[in-house]
Image (cartoon, grey):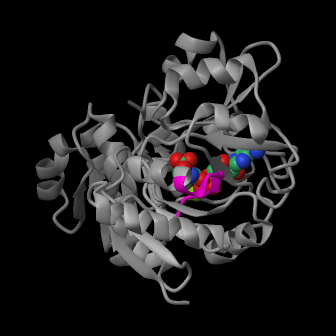
């Protein structure tokens, strides 16, 4: 398949022509990669079963892992899902933006799109290119992250070009993703609380300010026991996994350095907070050190994480060491992605 790559820097008249073209591709059952404020999405008409089937094939994604449908206004959910008061409370506070809400689905959403579930995940993105494309199509766009299944989600166009060239009809090269980790996913409960299925930029305390009580699904911070049913099917797959094994270190800088030195592995990478980069470089001259952003700047770390994992992947390291993030604020989203990248390998150094 030929893949057309179009660059859109701002929504000028040429960009609008390209968005029209992209919308015609979607209308005809094709696949278009587009930017969002979280990560790039691999889009198809959510109501077209054959088109949605092509998404699963292009990504190599298991067919029981449901897709998020992207709408341009919160009210557009009405045609596809049974909305609730909580949905509109959340929409008022966080949409458009990086929040996905799981609702009971209407029959208008093909089962294929929702991976056979009775529910559908709804998100109204903020990115202006994404919004223009959904509006031009006039229907929701089903879109998973635009990576090959098992790779980190793409946060810059070159990631998408690496993974999806030859697999999709068009790639829209927009700006780098603003946040860099996928949307927060919640499922409202009958008692007014919500269950957090995937943490993201919208944090537990952001949600608590709107809905009262937030329950963390077990898979957010822990490994699911063998055979357990995940509330969000994506949680059971090994995700965000670079080729080299990742080990997370729970300790202060000196403890981490001592541990890595004692392990004595060669060809290693070390993802370090900015404040520690020079210390780690001089203490571990054999390691390739990557700057994760400042210790207290979790948004910057979120912005860099997937790109760093992709860069490290190209170097064929034997092992990648990284700090274990906190579970506070945006830290919880980093923690959730990094324990998956590390297949839950955490070394406790006893702080
Ligand atoms: O930020 C994002 O959400 C990006 C951009 C492109 O919008 N999309 C994204 O999609 O991350 P994906 O498919 O890579 O991750 C969606 C997650 C999966 O883990 C899936 O299992 C879960 O959402 N999911 C989708 N529908 C669901 C449902 N009905 N119930 C529970 N979980 C659902
Ligand atoms: Mg994904």
Q: Residue at x 49, y 19 (%)?
A: 206
Q: Tell me if residue 124 can be seen.
A: yes
Quarter of the picture holding the C terminus = top left
Q: Tell me if residue 151 can be seen.
A: no
- State the predominant SS element of the stretch in magenta: loop
Residues 83 and 293: in front is 83
Q: Residue at x 53, y 11 (%)?
A: 209
Residues 128 and 55: in front is 128
Q: Is residue 46 left or right of residue 282?
A: right
Quarter holding residue 73:
top right
| Residue 168 location (% of width, % of height) | 55, 78
Q: Is residue 295 left or right of residue 51?
A: left
Q: Is residue 218 left or right of residue 189?
A: left
Marks counted in the figure total: 0
- Please, is residue 272 above or below residue 152 in the view? above
| Residue 83 location (% of width, % of height) | 76, 28
| Residue 322 location (% of width, % of height) | 37, 51
- Please, is residue 213 above or below residue 308 in the view? above
- Please, is residue 131 above or below residue 90 in the view? below
- Please, is residue 243 above or below residue 341 in the view? below
Q: Is residue 308 left or right of residue 154?
A: left
Q: Residue at x 27, y 55 (%)?
A: 10
Q: Residue at x 16, y 50 (%)?
A: 277
Boundaries of the magenta span: 136-149
Quarter holding residue 81:
top right
Quarter of the picture holding the N terminus = bottom right
Query: Was residue 145 drawn as part of the magenta stretch in this picture?
Result: yes
Residues 126 and 163: in front is 126
| Residue 260 location (% of width, % of height) | 33, 56
Query: Was residue 39 drawn as part of the magenta stretch in this picture?
Result: no
């Amino acid at each position: 398949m030929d893949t057309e790559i179009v660059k859109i820097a701002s929504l000028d008249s040429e960009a609008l022509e390209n968005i029209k073209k992209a919308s015609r591709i979607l209308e005809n059952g094709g696949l278009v990669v587009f930017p969002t404020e979280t990560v790039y999405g691999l889009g198809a008409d959510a109501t077209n079963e054959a088109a949605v089937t092509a998404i699963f094939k292009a990504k190599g994604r298991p067919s029981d892992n449901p897709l998020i449908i992207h709408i341009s206004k919160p009210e557009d959910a009405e045609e596809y899902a049974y909305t609730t008061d909580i949905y509109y409370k959340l929409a008022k506070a966080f949409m458009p933006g990086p929040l996905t809400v799981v609702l009971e689905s209407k029959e208008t959403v093909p089962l294929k799109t929702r991976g056979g579930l009775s529910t559908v995940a709804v998100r109204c993105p903020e990115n202006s290119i994404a919004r223009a494309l959904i509006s031009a199509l006039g229907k929701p766009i089903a879109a998973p992250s635009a990576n090959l299944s098992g790779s980190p989600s793409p946060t810059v166009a070159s990631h998408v070009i690496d993974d999806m060239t030859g697999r999709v009809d068009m790639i829209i090269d927009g700006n780098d993703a603003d946040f860099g980790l996928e949307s927060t996913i919640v499922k409202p409960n009958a008692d007014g609380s919500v269950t957090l299925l995937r943490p993201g930029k919208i944090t537990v305390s952001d949600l608590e300010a709107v809905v009262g009580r937030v329950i963390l699904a077990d898979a957010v911070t822990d490994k699911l026991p063998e055979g357990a049913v995940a509330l969000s099917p994506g949680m059971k797959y090994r995700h965000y996994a670079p080729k080299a094994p990742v080990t997370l270190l729970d300790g202060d800088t000196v403890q981490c350095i001592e541990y890595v030195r004692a392990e004595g592995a060669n060809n290693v990478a070390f993802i370090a907070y900015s404040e520690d980069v020079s210390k780690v470089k001089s203490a571990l001259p054999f390691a390739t050190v990557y700057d994760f952003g400042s210790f207290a700047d979790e948004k910057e770390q979120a912005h860099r994480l997937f790109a760093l994992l992709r860069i490290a992947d190209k170097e064929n390291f034997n092992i990648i060491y990284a700090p274990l993030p906190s579970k506070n604020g945006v830290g919880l989203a980093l923690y959730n992605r990094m324990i998956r990248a590390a297949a839950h390998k955490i070394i406790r150094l006893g702080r």
